Image (cartoon, rainbow, N blue to C red):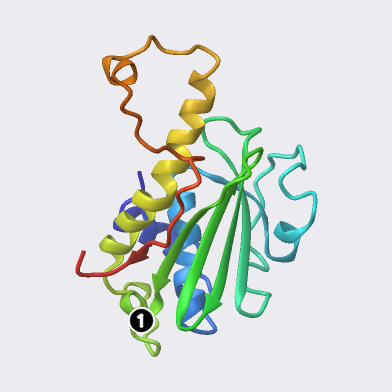
Amino acid sequence: MATDKTVMAVIRAARPTFRNKYDKIAFAVHASFHASGYVLTATGPHALSDTALSNPSTDEVAVDHWNELDDEYAFVYANPENRSKKVLLKCLVMNDKLLVDALCGGSSEALHLEINVEDYAGDNGSNNYSDQYKNLDKFVKGLDKDILSKLESSSKSASSSRNPPKTSDRSRSGIHEPSVGSGDYSSRIIHPSG
């Protein structure tokens, strides 16, 4: 799991140039994936190609061209648990929010998150990366809760489906909890107050 410190370390190591507050938050999303072990295999226009998820290459690429597009960002990652499984991450600017969608290769349902950019974008005039963000800990925890941990659990459940577990008492009782892929992707908004 990424932490605010590991995410900031990724940001500092990459030394990105930000054009605006949306760039800052989109790069923090990328840094969270990177700090969680995901391997970047495409970014920018290359990540939006029709073959981005099906491309068999798992070679790591530089983060060049990540903010080349206006008001949208795209990244493709190889899953740290199974490098042949890829994740497409798209971020779209809309009404002072950054809409984040993550789609795991082979899945028909995307995970969705809305981020209030003003809650996390810090001082524009500072050359210090830590000043360019606020509430980074809350941001990273929210992204982990609503996207990264669900990608991880769907990856683990896909690998465990080859060896199905024994039926639990909960399953026999008829109680079923919704899971990734159940179609319940109502909007989630990260707020710094919780």
Asked whether 153 or 180 is in front, the reply is 180
**Residue 10 in the image, given as x and y percentages of width and height:** 44, 58
Q: Residue at x 59, y 49 (%)?
A: 103
**What amino acid type should be assigned to the residue bearing mark 1?**
Glu
Height in image: 143 above or below 25? above
**Residue 182 in the image, given as x and y percentages of width and height:** 48, 40
| Residue 65 horizontal side relative to residue 114, left or right | right
**Residue under pointer 1:** 118
**Residue 116 in the image, given as x and y percentages of width and height:** 38, 75
| Residue 21 horizontal side relative to residue 91, left or right | left
Asked whether 133 or 148 is in front, the reply is 148
| Residue 189 horizontal side relative to residue 80, left or right | left
The quarter in which the N terminus is drawn is: top left
The quarter in which the C terminus is drawn is: bottom left
Q: What residue occupies the far top of the structure in this picture?
A: 166
Asked whether 21 or 185 is in front, the reply is 185
Q: Residue at x 50, y 84 (%)?
A: 20
Q: Secondary structure at mark 1?
A: helix
Toward which corner of the image does residue 44 lie, by quadrant? bottom right
Q: What residue occupies the far right of the structure in this picture?
A: 50
| Residue 58 horizontal side relative to residue 162, left or right | right
Q: What residue occupies the far left of the structure in this picture?
A: 193
